[in-house]
Image (cartoon, coloured by chain):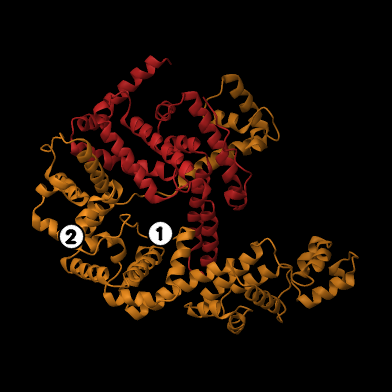
Chain colours: A orange, B red
Amino acid sequence: MRSNKMSRTEPNFDDETLVAFLDGDLPPSQRTAIESKLREDQQLQQRLQRLQSTWDMLLELPESEPSPHLTQSTIALVTVDLEKGEQSFRWWPFPRHLLMLMVIALLVSGLGAITGYALSYAQRLRLVKQLPAIVEFRVLQHIDSWDWLEMLTQIEYLHEAAEYLQTTGEGSAPVVIGKEPLPSEPSGRWKWMQSLDAQATARLHANVEDFRRLSVHRQEQLYDIADRLLADPQREELLAAARSYAVLLDTEGTKREQAIKQMSPTERVAEIEQIIARNLLIKYADEMSPADRNALLDWIERMRRKPDMPFAFDPYQLIIDELVQDPQVSLITTEDIDQLLTQLSPFPAELFRKLPSEYEQRAIIIRWILTLTQQGDRPKLPATEVLMNKFQQLPRQDQDLLELLPEEEVQEYLQQMLGVRSNLNGDS
Amino acid sequence: MSLVDYAEQGAKAAEKDPDVQLMLRVQQDDAVAFEQLIETYQKRLHRVLRHTVASESVAEDLVQEVFLRVWRARKKYRPTAKFSTWLFHIAHNVANNSVRDFKRRREFQVAAADASRSDAFSMDQMVVASTGAMPVRRLDKTERAEMVKAAIEALNERQRMALMLFRFEGLSYQEIAEAMGLSVQAVKSLLRRARVNLKTLLEPYLDAGLVPGSAPAVDKDADEVQ
């Protein structure tokens, strides 16, 4: 900020003084001085304008929406705290619905004797029975059958894609409740609940609320899946697949998520594989093997030299400009894209082929090229730098005209020129 | 204005504030009033705290922590100012503790350090936009919003808190001073520096569509006010 503290044109009015002026906080003499200067100094007017414009931009800050369960889980948290610290609290003035919430929270927190009195044995049994589905509710809510859960474990690179999405911050995995896994034996579950801290208890409470909003049929379905999961020797693997699936869905937005859930299992697998392919190819841009990097550079060079391809000193931009065109009219054809894919190693080539359209393939190639251009050791294409130096010696109008010519003509022209500045209009 | 004047002004503001009346009911263990206060303030608190910590879930944990403290402190509550001033004073302390914990334990990411998200965002949008799958207008608006978010998160904690309370919560200088335990003059100075920093961060974006990270480094430590 030091560079901004003093104005380039008027050392007396730094930006902070101008803010004070805008806020009406300056003494009259200083205010008058700025007003007077403003009448004649356009740069000062512009600086004031910029302070105001950047201040106005703040109104574009995205709205933040807390979770819809926040009120309930806060009350649950306070209730747990209350129970721990204030045994003499007066219960009777509480309205019935709030009391119910508190009772449920107490039940979930497993706070011994009071909970035992508050709930009947049958209710307690029901909760313990449903607990596997409730604890993993945020993961299992996306699973509609045991078969689908098993299918998920067969999808290649599911975990790798989910892990990548979490590192970029685009997707997040549901929070795990409790430090220890839920015991498979119902007799140990009550003790497990008692061991939860207040935050975990509040999260469990929110899960209880959401789980009980489901239809009885869906509750039973989830309970069956969770129960079976608990007894399955492959439990960790199955749960990890469901968790990764939840991360992928989290990045797709609610509407897309619903659309995916409506698909048949086969369509859904294809859709998931596309999401995985897209994300792993984006990830691969940053960790490309030398062989694939060279294949890409060779391909760019070949595309640059294609007949009819206009001349440009930035071949990367030239190729990107062509890739964003419709494949029907682009100078880079579908065959060219296929040619690149055949030169890549099997892993990225296979992922490319899983993408649903050539548009998406082109988008990923653009991403790769952009990554290449951003890497510190940007590779130079042959002769480009020499030609560029010569080109930059030309008058602006010659540069404009040259960029309309085919590359071969431009190269020939530049080589003939040998540093002699001439008028291209006259030559042509 | 003397301290006595401020105190009188605060007491008058409290008399007119319906939320103070709700808090006085909470003091009498009225759970309905407490639920009403949570409903009224949770979104506002979330907005302020969201820009103090890295993740949504940590922000929500902090909102809960604030209300937990309100509940615990209810018996000691005295209506000497608007309720929001007292609430944001607690929020400020909770946010400070959280940031201090982060620095001590390195368990959480500070939002300001997470600049890579903005880069990744714009790159991805570029790719998506190039496929024609996203309308350009929407991309611009979203990207601008992300730029503003990144700029706010690049301010230091005190500038950020003062800015959020002033610009988004509409608190007066005096109320921010009470919430943050500073003098009115210090708050004004903090806000001016925040505003100048924002200009530095967002100006390149106004000019040429560059991201804030490409602007000169912001002098984050230049607000040591008393």
Q: Relative to A156, say whether B128 is above or below.
A: above
Residue B215 image point, x, y percent: 62, 46
Q: Are marks 2 and 1 in contact (CB under 8 Å)?
A: no
Query: Where, quadrant-wise, is the N terminus of chain B in this rendering?
Result: top left
Instruction: Assess disc 2: are there few (<14), some (14-19) or many (≥20) residues with their C-alpha within 10 Å of its C-alpha.
Output: few
Question: In the image shown, does B84 or A15 lie closer to the viewer?
Answer: B84
Please report, as a chain letter, where disc 2 is located: A
Report which residue position mark 1 lands on.
Answer: A172
Instruction: Specify whether residue B150 is in view.
Output: yes
In the rendering, which numbered label is found on residue A187?
Answer: 2
Residue B174 left/right relative to A117:
right
Tag 1: residue type? Ser
Q: Secondary structure at mark 2?
A: helix
For the residues marked 2 and 1, what is the alpha-carbon distance in whole angstroms? Answer: 32 Å
Q: Relative to B125, say whether B4 is above or below.
A: above
Residue A310 image point, x, y percent: 71, 74
Q: Which circle's residue, 2 or 1, is located before the other in the chain?
A: 1
Tag 2: residue type? Ser
Q: Secondary structure at mark 1?
A: loop
